[in-house]
């Protein structure tokens, strides 16, 4: 069985149980449901709220470099700290946080494989106390925009879809991809039009995860993406609705499969599906050219 | 404190598949319902029994799922 390309970016729940309170290690919980942390978390873990601490709350954007530095300083993180992130929903927003940490060049940031669900299901110790954190001084690197896709890049990739110059991977559910629904069932609609970016392949994020929340094996992941024509031979752009599910897929492609050129389009469908004049494709995608059965 | 008796099950509400996971913290039960695909959390609740707590979470989930509009594709 093949190894992940970068196994150092994942830790097990066992590892966290043993090292959560080590000097130089900071455990961070990032949930979709921001109340989950208060109910009980990994002892010693702090929490980052995706909707207030991991985005610019005025304009739609990720954290600025300064905001990222301030978050790290408040969190007691230095550039040498090993940051281990976990969360609910199979690490959706944990992956979003990891992606931003990589954008700003944090050297050692990892995901706890299986996230909050695995920790709970293993009946591991929980705490309701937030740890006291001693603030630090943190200098981030310039944003690495090679990890992030913006609208013009997505438009170019879509326009060249027939030439297969880049792979656009839509990681939303099949019903969101076809346009049957405008948002995940039960959630508010956040777009004017349903469907997908023309030329995109539908590879829902959840296909990369096992039932216990852990990532599938490297062999299974490679088969999953290769069967849809995504093999790392050309640039890949992953997108979803607001960029967190696609962070999960971005992590898989970048660190578990080791593809060089993978970007996360955090504008995602809430940008494309609200654009005036943008082309939208509806219904199922055609079979990938050259894809294995 | 530890999460005890963690269990998950699938059911259908308002025409959509739902996953409900629940566990006990001390004497309190904590269920969470999600929409399976993509797995977004819909509702959480608390209760003194698993059945009571899940009933509350599922009632809220059903209310939210009932608002989902299907478009002709």
Image: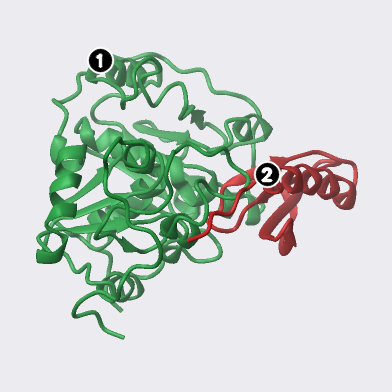
Chain colours: A green, B red
Residue A182 point in image, percent of width and height? 50, 47
Judge from the rendering whether residue A194 lies leftward or rightward of residue A185; answer left or right. left
Residue A101 location, quadrant: top left
Q: Residue at x 57, y 35 (%)?
A: A43
Residue B29 point in image, percent of width and height? 81, 44
Q: Residue at x 30, y 35 (%)?
A: A276
Where residue A84 is drawn, which disc sits there?
Answer: none
Q: Quadrant of the N terminus of chain A?
A: bottom left
Query: Do residues under tags 2 and 1 come within 8 Å of each other at their CB atoms?
Result: no
Judge from the rendering whether residue B31 lies leftward or rightward of residue A254; answer left or right. right
Do circles 2 and 1 both sit on a common chain?
A: no
Nearer to me, B20 or A228: A228
Q: Is residue A33 above or below residue A235?
A: above
Where residue A66 is drawn, which disc sits there?
Answer: 1
Residue A80 point in image, percent of width and height? 24, 30
Q: Is residue A90 above or below residue A272?
A: below
Judge from the rendering whether residue B72 lies leftward or rightward of residue A5; answer left or right. right
* Residue at the farthest bottom position: A293
Q: Could you say whether the residue bearing mark 2 is in a helix, strand or loop?
A: loop
Nearer to me, A272 or A256: A272
Q: Which residue is mark 2?
A: B67
**Residue B30 in sight:** no
Number of marks: 2
CA distance separating discs 2 and 1: 40 Å
Judge from the rendering whether residue A181 lies leftward or rightward of residue A178; answer left or right. right
Nearer to me, A56 or A67: A56
């Amino acid at each position: 069985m093949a190894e992940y390309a970068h196994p150092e970016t994942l830790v097990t729940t066992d590892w966290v149980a043993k090292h959560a309170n080590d000097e130089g290690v900071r455990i961070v919980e990032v949930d979709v449901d921001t109340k989950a942390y208060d109910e009980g978390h990994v002892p010693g873990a702090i929490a980052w709220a995706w909707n207030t601490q991991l985005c610019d709350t005025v304009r739609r954007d990720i954290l600025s470099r300064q905001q990222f530095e301030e978050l790290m300083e408040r969190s007691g993180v230095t550039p040498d700290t090993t940051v281990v992130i976990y969360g609910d929903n199979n690490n959706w927003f944990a992956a979003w946080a990891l992606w931003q940490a990589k954008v700003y060049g944090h050297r050692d940031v990892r995901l706890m494989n299986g996230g909050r669900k695995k920790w709970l299901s293993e009946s591991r110790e929980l705490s309701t106390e937030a740890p006291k954190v001693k603030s630090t001084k943190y200098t981030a690197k310039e944003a690495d925009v090679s990890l992030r896709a913006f609208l013009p890049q997505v438009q170019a990739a879509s326009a060249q879809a027939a030439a297969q110059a880049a792979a656009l991977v839509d990681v939303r559910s099949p019903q969101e991809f076809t346009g049957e629904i405008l948002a995940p069932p039960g959630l508010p609609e956040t777009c004017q039009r349903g469907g997908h970016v023309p030329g995109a392949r539908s590879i829902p994020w959840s296909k990369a995860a096992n039932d216990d929340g852990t990532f599938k094996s490297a062999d299974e992941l490679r088969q999953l993406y290769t069967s849809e024509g995504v093999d790392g031979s050309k640039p890949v752009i992953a997108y979803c609705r607001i960029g967190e599910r696609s962070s999960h897929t971005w992590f898989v492609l970048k660190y578990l499969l080791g593809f060089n050129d993978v970007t996360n389009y955090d504008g995602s469908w809430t940008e494309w599906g609200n654009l005036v004049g943008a082309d939208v494709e509806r219904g199922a995608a055609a079979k990938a050219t050259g894809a294995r059965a | 404190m530890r999460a005890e008796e963690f269990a998950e099950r699938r059911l259908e509400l308002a025409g959509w598949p739902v996953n409900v996971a629940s566990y006990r913290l001390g004497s309190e039960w904590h269920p969470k319902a999600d929409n399976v695909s993509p797995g977004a959390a819909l509702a959480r609740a608390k209760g003194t029994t698993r059945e009571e707590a899940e009933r509350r979470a599922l009632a809220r989930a059903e209310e939210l799922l009932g608002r989902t509009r299907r478009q002709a594709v």
